[in-house]
Image (cartoon, rainbow, N blue to C red):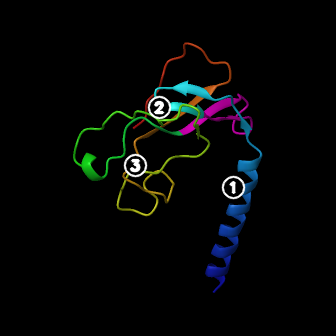
Amino acid sequence: MFILLSLSITLALTQVVKAQSASNLTLLPPLATTSGRVQGYLDTNTTSTHLQKWYGIRFAQDTSGQNRWKPPQPYTGPANNSEIFSATQFGPACMQGRADGGNGTSVQSEDCLRINVIAPLGAKDLPIYVYS
C-alpha cells in the first residue's frame, strides 16, 4: 500500500513539474530546416552555459506500413510551410521491447526517426557529435 501511494504521489508531482516547466519555456524563433519549420527553446537552467535545444525533429518518414523493412525514406516536411513543429519534447523511442525504450521515455513508436539538437547559445562552426 505504501509503495503504491508513494508511486501515485511521485507521478502526480512529476506531472505538475512537467506542466510548469512546459509553460515557462523561453521559445526560440522558428528555424527553417529540411524537415520544415521548427521551434525549440532556450535552456538557462541545466548548465552555466545557456543551451539552445530542439528535440524530436523528424529526419525520415515513419517506418511503419509500406515503409516497414525498408531503408529510411526522406522526410518531406509538412505540405503547409506555415506550420511550425514544436521541438520542445523528445520524440518517441524506437520499439525496443522494454518499458522505457532505452532512452528514459515510455513512448515508443515506429515513427521514431527523429533527431535532437543541442547547441550553446551563439554557437557557430563547432564540431558535431552524433550519438546513436
Of residues 50 and 60, the one nearer the viewer is 60
Placement of 13 over or under 68, stated as above or below: below
Graded by Cα atoms within 10 Å as few (under 14), some (14 to 19) or many (20 or more), the crowding at tag 1 reads: few
Where disc 2 sits, the SS reads loop
Q: Residue drawn 71% across and 29% down?
A: 50
The C terminus lies in quadrant? top left
Where disc 1 sits, the SS reads helix
Q: CA distance from mark 3 to mark 2?
A: 14 Å
- The amino acid beneath tag 1 is Lys
63 left or right of 27 in image: left
The image position of residue 52, as x and y in percent, is: 65, 30
Q: Earlier in the sequence, mark 1 or mark 3?
A: 1
Q: CA distance from mark 1 to mark 3?
A: 23 Å
- The amino acid beneath tag 2 is Ser
Quickly name the residue at label 1.
18
Magenta-colored span? 39-55
- Please tell me whether residue 18 belongs to the stretch shown in magenta: no
Q: Earlier in the sequence, mark 3 or mark 2?
A: 2
Of residues 66 and 103, the one nearer the viewer is 66
Quickly name the residue at label 2.
35
Looking at the image, the residue that sits furthest to the bottom is 1
Graded by Cα atoms within 10 Å as few (under 14), some (14 to 19) or many (20 or more), the crowding at tag 3 reads: some
Give the label on residue 111, or none: 3
